[in-house]
Structure formats: structure tokens, C-alpha cells
Image (tube, rainbow, N blue to C red):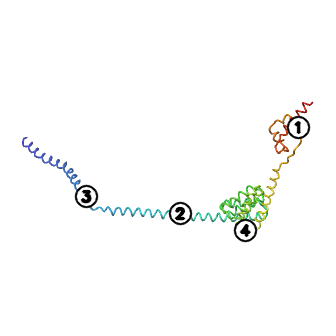
Amino acid sequence: DERRSKAGGDAAAPASAAAAAAVTAPAKAAAGTRVGSGATNFDKWQSYDAEGAVEALERRESERESLRQRVVSLENKRAREEAMRRRGESEARADAMRARGNAAFGSARYEDAVSDYTEALEANPRSAALYANRSLALLKLRAFDEAEEDATAALDLEPSCVKARLRRAAARTELGKVDEAIEDLEAALEVEPRNKAAREALGSCRARRASREAARRSKRRVALSVAEVEHDLDNDGHPFVAAACARPRHDGSAEAAGGAEAAGGAEAAGGA
């Protein structure tokens, strides 16, 4: 039995040693790995090209920005081309409607002309000529307020438009705004000094203004008539009556007529 126990103990000792070695080996290996990885990382850091990395990053950013600018440029170009295409279509439509409006005006279909010019303006709202044309059609329809507004819109777009000046002057004349009409006609003659229509209209407006001023002056004249009334003794003492009735004496001084007449009246009353 003692020999078996000793043999068993001898056999268990190597097993225990092997188990202990199995437990400690991974720890040693891990420790070795940690030490080794730190040294390796340090070596890598020593060899790391920081400036090169920054330059590479800047190149990538520059490439991205260049690409973004190219995309924006292409989008802007596409947008400009689309806007030009639409503008061309709008102008073509406006020209067609303007021609139709001119034909209607020439046939004295003024309401149709106004409608056609309006549709043309929807396609091209920056056309001074279209506003001036519609203003003339509105004058024919005796829509003077609207004609004045259209002529003003045309002048806002093109201040030197003589046709718009003449049409606004015509509308203002009909609305009784003679002074403003004269201003428009004078402005038109500054641009076209030999414009016969402007000269004739200006002469007519000036004659109209002169007639108006003469009528105003005649209305300001008031006819007064003086009537004689009976002498009222009760008013002789009033200062206004005394001043109004004062008359010069032979010696150059003034005498109140009321006072003298009052005295004469008193004497007459006493004698009676």
C-alpha cells in the first residue's frame, strides 16, 4: 500500500506541474504580446509621415471642391439654357399676340385689341411698346383712367417713349389734368422737337388752360350795388357809422356827419 501511495504521488506531481504550466503560459504569452505590440506601435509612429497624410487629405478636399464647382457650373449652365429657351418661347408668343392685336386695332375691334395686348403682356411683361399699344386701344374705348395707367407703365420701362407721352397726355386732357398733359407734351418735344402731333396737342392744351383761367377770373368778380336807406337816428352814435359818414369841413378838419345830424335832429325835436 505504501508503495502504491508513493507511486500515485509521484504520478500526480507531473500532472500538477503540467496543469500549472498550462495556466501560466497564456498569461506569459499575453504579457509578451502586450510588450511586443507597444514596441511595434512605437516603431510605426516613428515611421508615420504626418505631413504626407495632411497633404493627401488636402488633395482629397481639393478634388471634392473642384468636383462640386463643376457640378454647380453645369447646373447653372443648364438653368441659363432653360431660361433662355423659355424666354424665347415667351417672346415669340408675345410677338404673335401683338401682331394679332395690331390687326384687331386696324379693324377697329378695340376690345379684341385690348385682349390680345393683355395676353401678349402676360408673356412679356417688360415690353413698353405693348403697354403703349394697349393704352391707345383704351383711349379709343374712352377708358381714360386705364389708358393713363398703361402709358405710365410704358414710361416706367422706357422714359423716352414719345408715343407713351402723347397717349398719356391725351388721357390726362380728357380727365381734366391739363397741366400734367402739358408737362407730358413738353417732355415729348424735348425728345422729338419736330413732332407735329405733340406741337398741335400742346397748343390745344395751352389754349384750354388759358380759357380755364379766364373762367376762374370771371367767377371771382362780384357785383356790388349800393342802395340809399333812410336815416336812423339810433345808429348815429355807433363808431362805424360815425367813421363812414365823416366828411371834411371847410377849414380842412373832419366832422362826424352823424353827430351833426343828431344835433340837428335834437334841435328840431326841441323846436317842435
Mark 3: secondary structure: helix
Pointer 3 with pointer 2, Cβ within 8 A: no
Q: Can you tell which mark lies on residue 76? A: 2
* Crowd class of label 3 (few under 14; some 14 to 19; many from 20; radius 10 Å): few
Residue to which mark 3 is pinned: 42
How many angstroms separate mark 1 from mark 2 (CA)?
101 Å
- According to the image, label 4 marks what residue? 193
Along the viewing direction, whichever of 230 and 182 lies nearer the viewer: 230
Residue under label 1: 231
Badge number at residue 209:
none
User: Between residues 200 and 53, which one lies in front from this camera angle?
Assistant: 200
Q: Position of residue 22 (x, y in %)?
A: 19, 49
Say few, some or many: other residues with alpha carbon within 10 Å of mark 2 (under 14 / 14 to 19 / 20 or more). Answer: few
42 sits left or right of 94 in the view: left
Per the model, the C-alpha gap separating discs 3 and 1 is 137 Å
Name, please, the residue furthest toward the left: 2
In this rendering, the count of numbered labels is: 4
Q: Tag 1 or tag 3, which sits nearer the N-term? A: 3
For marks 3 and 2 on the same chain, the one whose residue lies earlier in the sequence:
3
Quadrant showing the C terminus: top right
